[in-house]
């Protein structure tokens, strides 16, 4: 079983960790992405990133430093978004970290597909960015089916806790032998399921932590998840491809 999540825009260097780092699987491709970004002007980078001048300048300087930067942080600790805060990887017990290392994969526009302890440097690049790396029309075309092929294990089960922007790098390549379970977190407004961005990110992070604590390879254990939002699995509104969790 694999679990996929999105990265976060906000990143940091974690210089205090002592975890053994692994090497990202797609370093050659990541260098192509880096070279493409470095060839852009600051103005072009700002448009590509869709951010303010301060954030653009920070990430422009990060790009310039990449060629001489030798320090790497484990991906799981480098990303600083809401999902990662509620996952709380810094307090994983050894067996929880071992579980996450086996099962969790982080989708990335820059690095492709990351294991939790893969060493990374801070960058900014969303998967949906119109980056025409190596003559392709966008990052989905650049990565093609490589991420899908690297993701699947022998069970061919994928628990999808990623946003549509990132899961779209995997879903077009699925075969009938694969099982993708997308977890939807929301609340009812009448008969409509409403998803609120912040709460969805919190629930995704907490579900990763829950799976690490349970240590199970059986996706059925997902249905017992409640989290801080008091979610309940709703069998009536769920399908084999989408498991719905509603706040009660």
Image (cartoon, helix red, strand yellow):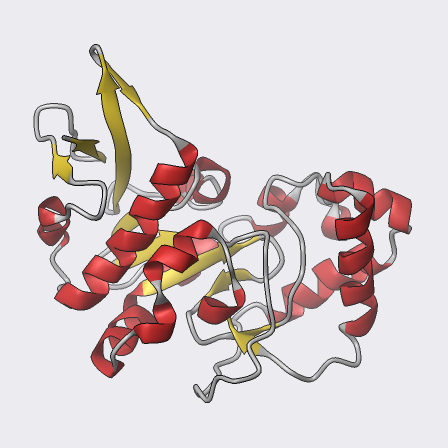
Quarter where residue 92 is shown = bottom left
- Depth check, front residue: 117 or 51: 51
Q: How many marks?
A: 0
Q: Residue shown at 22%/66% (left/top)?
A: 212
Q: Is any atom of residue 59 visible in this view?
A: yes
Image quarter of the N terminus: bottom left
Quarter where residue 187 is shown = top left
196 relative position to 134: left or right: left
189 relative position to 117: left or right: left
Q: Residue shown at 16%/35% (left/top)?
A: 240
- The location of residue 229, given as percent across then percent down, is 22, 41
Q: Residue shown at 38%/30% (left/top)?
A: 196
Q: Residue shown at 39%/61% (left/top)?
A: 105
55 relative position to 152: left or right: right
Image quarter of the C terminus: top left
- The location of residue 83, given as percent across then percent down, is 40, 52
Q: Is any atom of residue 6 visible in this view?
A: no
State whether residue 192 is above or below residue 115: above
- The location of residue 193, given as percent across then percent down, is 27, 20
- The location of residue 135, given as percent across then percent down, is 76, 47
161 relative position to 30: left or right: left
State whether residue 146 is above or below residue 97: above
């Amino acid at each position: 079983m694999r679990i996929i999540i999105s990265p976060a825009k906000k990143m940091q260097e974690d210089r205090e960790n002592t975890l053994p780092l692994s090497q990202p699987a797609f370093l050659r491709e990541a260098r192509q992405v880096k070279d493409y970004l470095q060839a852009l002007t600051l103005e072009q980078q700002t448009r590509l990133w869709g951010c303010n001048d301060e954030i653009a300048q920070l990430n422009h300087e990060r790009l310039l430093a990449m060629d001489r930067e030798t320090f790497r942080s484990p991906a799981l600790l480098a990303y600083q978004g809401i999902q990662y805060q509620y996952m709380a990887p810094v307090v994983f017990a050894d067996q929880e970290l071992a579980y996450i290392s086996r099962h969790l994969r982080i989708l990335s526009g820059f690095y492709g597909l990351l294991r939790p302890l893969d060493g990374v440097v801070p960058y900014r690049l969303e998967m949906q960015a119109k980056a025409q790396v190596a003559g392709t029309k966008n990052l989905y075309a650049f990565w093609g089916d490589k991420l899908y092929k690297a993701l699947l294990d022998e069970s061919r089960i994928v628990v999808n806790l990623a946003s549509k922007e990132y899961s779209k790098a995997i879903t077009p390549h699925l075969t009938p032998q694969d099982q993708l379970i997308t977890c939807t977190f929301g609340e009812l407004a009448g008969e409509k399921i409403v998803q609120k961005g912040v709460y969805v990110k919190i629930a995704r992070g907490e579900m990763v932590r829950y799976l690490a604590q349970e240590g199970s390879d059986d996706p059925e254990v997902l249905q017992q998840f409640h989290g801080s939002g008091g979610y309940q699995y709703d069998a009536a509104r769920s399908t084999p491809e989408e498991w719905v969790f509603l706040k009660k």
